[in-house]
């Protein structure tokens, strides 16, 4: 990718100087922040996310298929589906600290293996209880490990284009909504629901392959080494004070005390340590982002899980409802790649974009129960998907701004876990409104 840079070229001619402007092409650097290597990494993140969270993005169809296959009530069928999102987010309690200590790559690789394995063993489910374990817990743990840590990789590789790069990463999840629900519908019609899950699990093992490309950038490692060396030199200077103090008495005690205090502080807050990660709780804006993410997660899980069933209540066929969910994901994709990129360019702040997206999304959710036709439901679902795509990109970027790149793994893990805790009440809420009240309205 190039940009034209006008540069004057001057030559001596007929006793004077004549200048003409030549175009000089400036390319992205091969390595470094916002480099070609960074964009390749963003593509690998998107594909790892595409395969890693495919189960969650197919939850609308899975909900209907579980109802039909296991003859379960809506409250029972909601448990594995809601756990897909709830346990996925709760995994942040484990994945965040692990990525903070060992980097994101090994956590993503292990998560990809566990997630695909959970889908594969769902083939053997004799009842819904087994499916709650295999799909709702095992698959969700693996999927969550991958989903929570990958934004850290994006934040490490980008400075100027974080919003666009994060949009590309989360676009992988959106493409999963476009592809996997329809794939599962066709595979279920051809081979049955359990065999479809087996094929789905085999496909999702590809998340492991793309996770192998994710590495902490070398320039970030060098920065951490320089900071560690600077701390060591500071300790060395204070140590020198203690040597002088052996001759002059009072200097010794002050130098030694300062040195001991510094060593203790460095042990507590050394980058990569658990105590250093916990400093995210000292930032007030961390709690603002956490509350916003809890509200967003609750709305998103209800949308992605219940839209198909909501549409069938409006007289829309299951096939058309699944197609509607997949097609509306195009708006989700557009939302992830457009407005955050404009925020990167400075047309508006990320905070303002987040606020407007929340207001617009809330308004659409309030009016969705009034929709009765396919056209109206599809229009509102498309608008909600666009807001979801815009909003989800901003959370990890804002966290990196507020708490720093070195703490973003821990911060995103804790925010996700808080949202996961609230999701455990959703099956009871879904069962109450649909099974007892009789409507999602």
Image: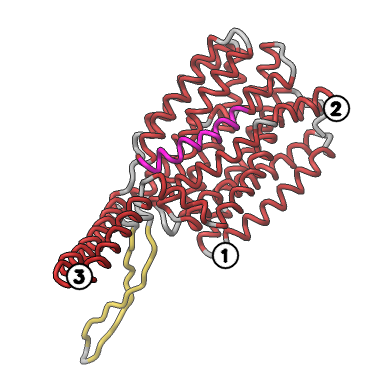
Q: Secondary structure at mark 1?
A: loop
Mark 3 — residue? 249
Question: Circle 2 sits on which residue?
Answer: 437
- Estimate the x, y position of residue 349 in percent, counting from the top left: 58, 62
| Depicted 45 relative to depicted 280: above or below | above
The relative height of residue 395 versus residue 381 in the rendered view (above or below) is below
Rounded to the nearest whole Å, what is the CA distance between mark 1 and mark 3?
Answer: 62 Å
**Is disc 2 surrounded by few (<14), some (14 to 19) or many (20+) residues within 10 Å?**
few
Mark nearest the camera among 1 and 2 is 2
Q: Disc 1 versus disc 2: distance between alpha carbons?
A: 46 Å
Q: Mark 3 to mark 2: distance in Å?
A: 81 Å
In magenta segment, residue 95: yes
Please state the horizontal and vertical placement of residue 33, each as a whole percent of the image.
36, 55
For disc 1, the marked residue is 347
Q: Which residues are magenta?
A: 83-101
In this rendered view, identify the residue nearer to me: 208 or 280: 280
SS at mark 2 in the image = helix
């Amino acid at each position: 990718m190039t940009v034209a840079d006008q540069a004057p070229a001057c030559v001596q001619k007929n006793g004077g100087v004549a200048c003409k402007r030549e175009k000089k092409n400036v390319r992205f650097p091969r390595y470094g922040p916002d480099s070609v290597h960074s964009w390749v990494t963003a593509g690998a993140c998107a594909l790892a996310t595409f395969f890693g969270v495919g189960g969650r993005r197919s939850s609308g169809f899975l909900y209907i298929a579980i109802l039909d296959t296991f003859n379960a009530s809506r409250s029972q069928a909601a448990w594995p589906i809601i756990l897909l999102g709830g346990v996925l987010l709760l995994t942040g309690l484990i994945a965040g600290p692990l990525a903070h200590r060992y980097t994101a790559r090994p956590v993503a690789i292990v998560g990809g293996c566990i997630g695909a394995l959970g889908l594969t063993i769902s083939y053997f489910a004799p009842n819904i209880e087994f499916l709650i374990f295999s799909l709702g817990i095992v698959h969700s743990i693996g999927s969550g490990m991958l989903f929570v840590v990958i934004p850290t990789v994006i934040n490490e590789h980008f400075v100027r284009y974080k919003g666009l790069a994060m949009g590309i990463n989360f676009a992988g999840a959106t493409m999963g909504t476009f592809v996997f629900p329809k794939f599962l519908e066709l595979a279920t019609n051809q081979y049955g629901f359990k065999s479809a899950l087996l094929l789905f699990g085999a496909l999702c093992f590809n998340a492991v392959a793309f996770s192998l490309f994710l590495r902490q950038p070398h320039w970030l490692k060098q920065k951490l080494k320089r900071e560690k060396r600077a701390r060591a030199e500071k300790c060395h200077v204070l140590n020198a004070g203690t040597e002088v103090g052996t001759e002059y008495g009072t200097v010794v005690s002050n130098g030694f005390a300062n040195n001991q205090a510094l060593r203790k502080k460095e042990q507590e807050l050394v980058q990569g340590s658990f105590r250093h990660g916990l400093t995210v709780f000292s930032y007030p804006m961390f709690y603002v982002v956490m509350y916003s993410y809890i509200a967003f997660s609750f709305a998103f899980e209800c949308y992605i899980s219940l839209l198909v069933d909501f549409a069938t209540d409006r007289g829309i066929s299951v096939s058309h409802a699944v197609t509607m969910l997949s097609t509306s994901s195009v708006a989700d994709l557009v939302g992830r790649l457009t407005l955050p990129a404009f925020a990167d360019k400075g047309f508006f702040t990320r905070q303002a974009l987040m606020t407007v997206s929340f207001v617009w999304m809330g308004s659409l959710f309030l009016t969705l129960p009034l929709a009765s036709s396919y056209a109206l439901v599809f229009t509102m679902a498309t608008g909600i998907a666009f807001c979801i795509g815009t909003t989800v990109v901003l959370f990890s970027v804002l966290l990196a701004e507020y708490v720093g790149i070195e703490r973003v793994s821990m911060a995103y893990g804790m925010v996700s876990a808080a949202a996961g805790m609230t999701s455990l009440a959703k099956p009871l809420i879904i069962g109450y409104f649909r099974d007892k009240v009789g409507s999602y309205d």
